[in-house]
């Protein structure tokens, strides 16, 4: 039992050292890149959601944070692979759609 306690204490000490070195050197700890999987059907679902909420859009079909949070909740049901489709991920996907990467999808939805 004492051996397990010593190992746990050792790992806690190592973790503290890593964080303190990162802070001292002012290098942020690197987190793994989040990658959401977007099949065409999910892209169409996001566009459908935004079309339904177009009254909340401002100039240039830009949306506020509350709409992106609602979109993330809506898209959670469609996440079967990859990381979650968060509000930021949905907003970035919409920016690429608006930039012209997915014009056929927009044409199908009269955007």
Image: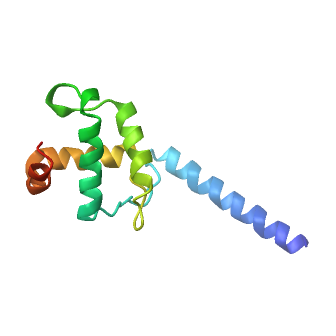
Q: Is residue 86 visible?
A: no
Q: Position of residue 5 (x, y in %)?
A: 84, 66
Q: Quadrant of the C terminus?
A: top left
Q: Is residue 65 above or below residue 103?
A: above
* Residue sitting at x 70%, y 58%: 13
Q: Position of residue 41 (x, y in %)?
A: 26, 62
Q: Is residue 8 above or below residue 19?
A: below
Q: Position of residue 51 (x, y in %)?
A: 23, 40
* Residue sitting at x 23%, y 45%: 94
* Residue sitting at x 54%, y 51%: 21
* Image position of 77 (left or right of 36): right
* Image position of 25 (left or right of 104): right
Q: Position of residue 31 (x, y in %)?
A: 45, 57
Q: Which residue reaches farthest right?
A: 1
Foreground of the two, 52 or 65: 52
Q: Quadrant of the N terminus?
A: bottom right
Q: Is residue 4 above or below residue 111?
A: below
* Residue sitting at x 29%, y 35%: 53
């Amino acid at each position: 039992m004492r051996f397990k306690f010593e190992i746990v204490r050792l790992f806690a000490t190592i973790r503290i050292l890593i964080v303190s070195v990162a802070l001292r050197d002012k290098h942020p700890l690197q987190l793994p890149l989040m990658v959401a999987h977007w099949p065409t059907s999910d892209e169409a679902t996001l566009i459908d959601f935004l079309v339904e909420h177009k009254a909340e859009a401002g100039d240039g079909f830009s949306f506020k944070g509350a709409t992106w949070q609602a979109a993330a909740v809506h898209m959670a049901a469609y996440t079967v692979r990859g990381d979650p489709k968060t509000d930021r991920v949905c907003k970035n996907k919409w920016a690429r759609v608006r930039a012209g990467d997915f014009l056929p999808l927009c044409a199908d939805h009269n955007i």
